[in-house]
Image (spheres, rainbow, N blue to C red):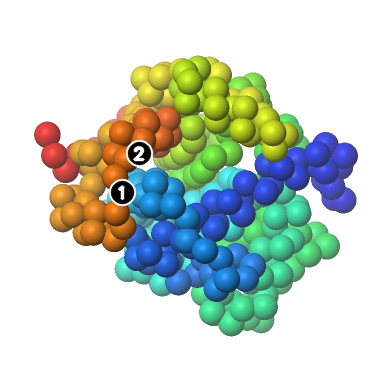
Amino acid sequence: MFPPSRAQAGDAPIRATDNDAAVARLSAVHKQYFNDPFIRYFVPRAHLLPPRPPLINIGTYVRSAGIDALVDQWLSLAGNAGQQCQIVSLGSGSDTRFWRIAAGPLKENLQTYVEIDFPEITTKKAMAIRKNKELMSGLGDPAKVTLAQGGTALHSPRYHLLAADLRLEPSETLEPMLYSSKDAEHPAILDPSLPTLLVFECVLVYMSASSSSRLLEWFVGRAERSQSGVLGCIVYEMFGLDDAFGRVMINNLKERNISLLGAEPYPTVESLPNRFLATGFSAAHGLTLKEIRKDYIEREELERISKLEFLDEMEELDLVLVHYAISWGLFLTKPDSSTNWGHWGLIRQRD
C-alpha cells in the first residue's frame, strides 16, 4: 500500500475528481446555498476561484441537503438509543463533515469519525489539517494529534484519517486498520458494538461491482459479529447512464481517462436498493436528486435558494438531477432494534 503502486499512479484522474467536488462545494458556499466554513481550507487558492454555474450549485446543494439529513438523523437516533455512534467516510477526499459535526449540536452523539482515501489524498489532507489552527482545534488536544504511516495517516481522540485502496481485499487492508488493537493504550479505532454509518460519495461508481459488493459484505459481516450490531450505509452517485445524457457523461469522463465501472448494474432508481439487499442489508431505499428537491426539502428552503441565482433552464436541471441519486441501506443484528433505527431515512415534506 505504501508507497503508491503503479495501479494507484494510474488513478490520478479519479483522485482529481475530489478537487472538482470541493470547488463545487466552495462555489455553493460562496453563493450562500449552505454554510461550510471549513471547505476553503481544502481548496488551493480558494479566494481566486470563480463561481460555478447555477445548475452545479443547485445540484451540490440538493446532494448536501440529502446526505446531511441522513447523517444528522443517524446521530440523533443514536442519542435516542442512549448511545454514541461511529461514522466511516470512504473515499472521503476533501470532505469537511467531521468538523461540521464537531461544531454542531449533535457532537456529543459521535464517538469516532474515520476517513479513508488514497494515500496521495490523505497526505495532502493531513498536511492541510496540521497547518490550520481552526481545523486542528476541532481535533481537541493538539498533543494527542499524531501523524502515522509516513504522513499518510493522522490520528486524534475522535478523528482518524487513513490511507487505503478500497478495491483491495478488506480483510487484509481495513481489518488491521479499523478493528485491531495494538495494546491496552491503543484500542481498535472502531467498536463493533456501536451503531456504525458508512458514507460513500461518488466512490463505488468508480469501482467494479464485485469490489464494491465485497466491501459492503465485509462491513455487514463485521456488524453480524456483534449481538447488537447496527450498520447504516449512504451512497451518492450517478446512475442510469444508458440514455443520451449518460452517454455524453461517459464520453466526457473517458476523455479524462475515467471509467464508471460501477454504474452498469444500476439502470434505474428502483435498482439502487439491490446493492444493499444483495450484500446482506436488511432494508434499503433510493431517491433521485430530482425527487429529493421536489418532495424532501422544505418549501421555505426551496423558496430561499430559488432567490440566490437565476436559472431559466429548469428542464436541464431536472435532466441532471434525475441521473444522480442518494440510496441508503440498514442492517440490524436484532430485529427489535427497528423500533428505533427503522425510522432512519429521508422524510417527505410534501405529498
Q: Nearer the viewer, mark 1 or mark 2?
A: 1
Q: Are marks 1 and 2 in contact (CB under 8 Å)?
A: yes
Residue 178 lies left or right of residue 168; in this view the side is: left
Q: Nearer the viewer, residue 124 or 104?
A: 124
Tell me the residue at 59%/58% (across/down): 94
Give x and y (percent) for residue 103: 41, 72
Q: Secondary structure at mark 2?
A: helix
Give x and y (percent) for residue 206: 63, 33
> In the image, what residue type sits under mark 1?
Leu
Q: Nearer the viewer, residue 253 or 296?
A: 253
Numbered tag placed on residue 311 in the rendering: 1
Q: Residues within 10 Å of mark 1 (few under 14, many from 20)?
A: some
Tell me the residue at 54%/58% (across/down): 23
Check the image and report above or below for 221 versus 64: above
Numbered tag placed on residue 58 in the rendering: none
Tell me the residue at 84%/47% (across/down): 4
Numbered tag placed on residue 317 in the rendering: 2
Give x and y (percent) for residue 186: 68, 63
Alpha-carbon distance for marks 1 and 2?
A: 9 Å
Residue 46 lies left or right of residue 103; in this view the side is: right
